[in-house]
Image (tube, helix red, strand yellow):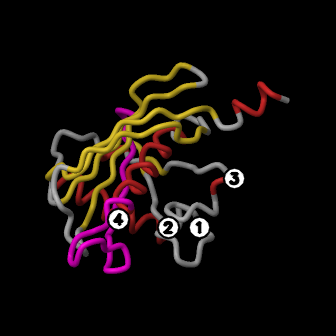
Amino acid sequence: MSLEHLSEKVLLLAQLRLHFADICADELVKVVRPSSHQHCMLCGTQPLLGLHLQFYSTADQQVWARAKGTIHQQGYQGILHGGFLSALLDSGMCQALFQQNIQAVTADMNIRYLHEVPVNSEILIKGKIISSRYPLYKVEGELYVAGKLVVKSNARFMAKGFGKKQNA
C-alpha cells in the first residue's frame, strides 16, 4: 500500500471512529476499481481536476470514503451544490458494487437532502448494496458531516453492458 493510501486510510479510520463507534473500522480494505474506471472524475487516478476519492470496505460490506467540497462545488453562496452531493452518493454506491466485483451503471436514483452542506465540510461517504439480483442491483448511499446524516439516496444499478448483449 502506498504512503498516500496508508495516510488516507488512517484519516478515514479516525473520522469513522469519531462518529461511528460501532463500525468495524479496524478491517478497512481498499476497494479496487476496475481498469475501465480509472478516468472517473470522482475516484479515478487519471483526471487532472478529479477528486481522487479512495474507498475502503468494512467487514459488514459497507464502503466508506472522505471528501471535502470547496468553493468550486458551491451552489448557493457557502453551500455545496446538490449535484455535487449527488455525484458523491453515486460514486459511493458504485464503489459498493465494485467491492463485490460487480460493474454496473446507475439506472435510477432517488435523493433526499436533509440538511444544507456548507462549503469546506469534511464529508463521509457511505455505500451499501441492499439487494443483488442480476442484472439489477439496489444500493443505498449516505453522506455525513460531523456524524450527522445530511443526504441519503437509494438507487438501482444495471449490469454494465446488459442492454448491448441483448441487442447484439
Dot 4: within a 10 Å radius of its alpha carbon, few (fewer than 14), some, or many (20 or more) residues?
some
Q: Secondary structure at mark 1?
A: loop
The residue depicted at 57 percent of the width and 49 percent of the height is 32
Q: Which residue is mark 2?
A: 52
Whichever of callouts 1 and 4 sits on the residue coming sooner in the sequence is: 1
Task: Report which residue position mark 4 lands on.
Answer: 67
Nearer the observer, 105 or 83: 83
**Amino acid residing under circle 4:** Ala
Residues tagged 1 and 4 counted as in contact (Cβ below 8 A): no
Q: Residue furthest top?
A: 133
Report the span colored magenta. Answer: 58-83
Residue drawn at point x = 71 percent, y = 31 percent: 163
The numbered mark at residue 36 is 3
In which quadrant will I find the C terminus? top right
Residue positioned most to the front: 76
Label 2 close to label 3 by CB (< 8 Å): no
* Amino acid type shown at disc 3: Ser
